[in-house]
Amino acid sequence: MHEQLFKLISRTVILSDTDRALCEQYFEPVVFPKNRVIEEESKIPGYLYFVVSGFVRLFHYNDNGDEVTTHINCPPGFITSYPNFINQTKSGENLECLTACELLRITKTNLDLLTQNSTVFKDFSISVFQQSLTYNENRSKELATLSAEQRYLKLINDYPQIIHHVPLQYIASFLGMNAKSLSRIRKAIIK
């Protein structure tokens, strides 16, 4: 399972055999079934997850008790409630496997040890954090400036496999609309 992580890291930095061994030591492989909540709101996130395969989402409940999907992770990539994981504070979000998932996970303590023992992982961690900030900034901008149809078209262009694996109500929520609006957009596009 670690090969996917090695491939991703190697796009940014060069991994030595020692770095690979440290990665295997600190990143624990886990498998979860579909619809499993693996991190719960009101708790400190236990892990940073690397998605080897499957689809994972972050969500919370709004004031009406409706689920609001804030992030959907397509493999490969990292996911957790980043600010809460890094600061070890209680999260307001849940982390759920939308499909059966193969994941690698690391605790905050082990991530700190890994970055202390490897400058490669320290550099890579900074890169991941920067990418996360950029992603969140772009996502906020897109929600504010793009129409619902434009957001949907961008999503299926960037991540075409998402439509086949993630229920439409979660995609709609992620795009800032209700499921009926997404259905109308999809029907208009197909015509």
Image (cartoon, grey):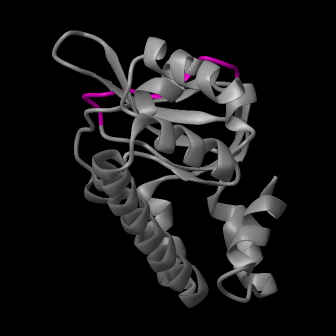
The image quarter containing residue 22 is: bottom right
Region of the chain picked out in magenta, as a range: 32-43
Residue occupying the point 75% across, 27% down: 164
User: Left of 35 or right of it: where is 109?
Assistant: left
Q: Is residue 85 above or below residue 165?
A: below
User: Left of 163 or right of it: where is 145?
Assistant: left
Magenta span has 22?
no
Q: Nearer the viewer, residue 118 or 177?
A: 177
Q: Is residue 20 above or below residue 106?
A: below
Q: Nearer the viewer, residue 161 or 57?
A: 161
User: Left of 31 or right of it: where is 177?
Assistant: left
The x, y position of residue 86, in whole percent, is 33, 59
Magenta span has 35?
yes
Quadrant of the image for the C terminus?
Answer: top right
What type of secondary structure mainly makes up the magenta span? loop
Q: Is residue 20 above or below residue 152?
A: below
Question: Is residue 172 shown to the viewer in this render?
Answer: yes
